[in-house]
Amino acid sequence: MTPPLRAQALFQDLEAVLDLRWLGGLAGADHILWSPLEASAPLYGRMNWIQPARVQILGPDESRFLNRLTPAARTELLGSLLGFPTGAILTCSEPGLAEALRVGADAAGVPLWYSPTPLAVVLDRLESYRHGLEASTVVHGELLEVFGMGLLITGGSGVGKSELALELISRGHRLIADDTPTLTRVAPDILEGACPPTLSDLLEVRGLGILNIRRMFGDSAIKRNKRVRLIIHLVKIEEIAPPAESRLQGMRDTRVILGVSVPAITLPIAPGRNLAVLVECAVRDHILRLGGYCAEQDLTARVEKAMARAAPCT
């Protein structure tokens, strides 16, 4: 898992691109500005007291607002700004504001940085940097878009994951990543899957070798990234003992990846089973369930209704 981000590391990573200067608060170099355990907390923001960020950005608008205040009100507001949970302050306006904060930053031990870079560029760089911090992992499987839904197909080596992916692609679905998709938690309950750049567009199939899916099927057969909404795990039928209730409910479970719960279906494979059709049906059924419809519940309601009609009147 990604380690916590400290003020010193953020400054070093962005010092060159933003021409950062450390003006005060050197004692706060070890302040934690971001942690994968608090991925929903904002890394940076602009004087938001409702959802304060760890890195407070002071741009020209904030500078003009502060200049309109009385000296006493400005001092009080800046004092609040230097309190918890502020981990660092980055000023992108005239240097005078940074100089006014220097003494307070040293006293509070809050890193104070100044950048002459335009505010829009600073915000864009910080947003790109934040995305790179999100917790991520690499899993073994095939990641595809099926009926518009991100689907991760997993299973042991040799069960036919790549062949199934190729069949789904030939049926009009889209490949995201073969064998080693990278999953990133971009929000507390959202996993996004993508392909490592080295392997983009490629699919390895036993007996055929490496296939370039984009060149074979066109650009429409490739998807850059997608939220993972469902996992289908392939297992040989002789290796499992399906519970009796699976005849009605299927073998459904939940798999937790990077703290995010993802619905999972275990699909037994055996000679003669059309896996591509089964996977398409599994995705269609999952879409219905997301919309509130469940076939086994529908059946149960029908049976209960029929039994009620057939019951003798007393």
Image (spheres, helix red, strand yellow):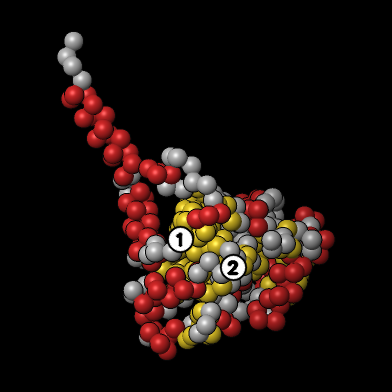
Residue at the spot 71% in from the left edge and 69% down from the top edge? 10
Q: Which residue is mark 1?
A: 270
Residue 34 vs residue 133, the one in the foreground: 133
Q: CA distance from mark 1 to mark 2?
A: 15 Å
Q: How many marks?
A: 2
**Residue most extreme to the top:** 314
Q: Which residue is pictured at 37% across the width and 60% down the height? A: 278
Q: Is residue 138 visible?
A: yes
Secondary structure of residue under mark 1: loop
Q: Earlier in the sequence, mark 1 or mark 2?
A: 2
Residue 257 occupies quadrant: bottom right
User: In the rendered view, would you say 236 is above or below 307?
Assistant: below
Q: Is residue 73 left or right of residue 219?
A: right
Q: Is residue 4 left or right of residue 142?
A: right
**Front residue of 110 and 271:** 271
Q: Residue furthest bottom?
A: 215
Report helix, strand or loop for mark 2: loop
**Disc 1 versus disc 2: nearer the observer:** 1
**In the rendered structure, which amino acid carries the disc numbered 2?**
Ser
Q: Residue at x 36, y 77 (%)?
A: 170
Residue 28 is situated, as x and y percent measured from the top left of the image, at: 79, 60
Q: Residues within 10 Å of mark 1 (few under 14, many from 20)?
A: few
The one of 233 and 284 positioned closer to us in this rendering: 233
Return the residue found at the far right: 27
Residue 192 in view (yes/no): no
Indicate the position of residue 232 as horizontal and vertical percent values: 47, 59
Mark number, residue 172: none
Read off the residue under disc 2: 157
Left of 80 or right of it: where is 147? left
